[in-house]
Amino acid sequence: GDHGCEYMTGGRAVILGRLGNALRASGRFGDARKAYEAALEIAVELNDLRSQGVDLARLGALAVTEGKLEEALTNHQAAQRLFRQLHETQMEAAAWHQLGRVHHRLQHAEEAERHYRQAVAKGMLKVMAKMGISTLQSYKGAQIFEALGIADEVIERCFHGTVSRLQGVSFAVLEQETLRRHALGYPQDPGDK
C-alpha cells in the first residue's frame, strides 16, 4: 500500500542525506548539494517537516563551507522555523547556533549575539526539562549537584554551598589550563600551532 511506498521513499531520503554528508566531507560540494536537494525534495513530497528542517540545515552548512553566507542564512532560518513549529527544542537550538555563526562571519555582531543567546536559552530549557525543572526559580540555589574534582577554595567562591567530597583543581590549576589553551588557540607566532 501507500505506507510501504512512503517508507521506502523516506529511506531513500535518509540515504541521500548521508551520501551528501560523505560527499561534503570529501570536498565534492556540487555532488553533496545534489544529494541534499534530492533528499529535501523527497521530504517535501512526503510532507515530513522534520526531515525538511534537517535537509535545509545541511544545505545551510554546505553554503557556509562554499562561502555562500546569504544562502546559508536563508536555509538556517527556514530550518529554525520548522524546528520551532515542531517543538524540536534541541534542533531549534542547533539552528539558532548556526545562524549565530553565519552572522558572525558576516560581521553582524548584534545578530550573532542574539542568535547565540537564543541557542543557549533553548539548550538550557531542554536540559532543565529533562531534569524535571519547570522554572528557573525552582533551579536557582536548589543545590541539586555535587562538584567533583574541584578544590574547596573554588567551591566556596564560585559554588557556595555545593557539596564536594572529592578535592581537585584549584584557581592556580584553572589559570594554568586557561592560559595553555589560549596559547594553543592564539599562538604568538602562527607557526607555533
Image (tube, rainbow, N blue to C red):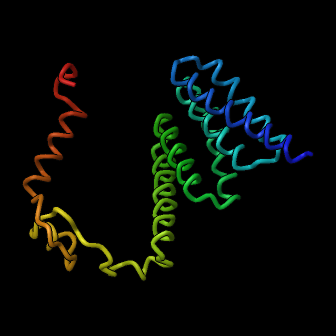
Q: Position of residue 129 (x, y in %)?
A: 51, 71
Q: Residue furthest right?
A: 1
Q: Position of residue 72 (x, y in %)?
A: 60, 34
What residue sits 22% from the left and 72% below the top?
159
What residue sits 56% from the left and 23% below the top?
66
Image quadrant containing the C terminus: top left
Q: Which image quadrant is residue 58 in?
A: top right
Q: Position of residue 180 (x, y in %)?
A: 15, 40
Q: Is residue 85 left or right of residue 146?
A: right
Q: How many marks?
A: 0
Q: Position of residue 135 (x, y in %)?
A: 48, 78
Location of residue 58 with respect to 122 vertically, above or below? above
Q: Name the residue nearer the viewer: 76 or 139.
A: 139
What residue sits 25% from the left and 34% below the top?
185
Q: Is residue 42 left or right of residue 169?
A: right
Q: Which image quadrant is residue 163 in?
A: bottom left
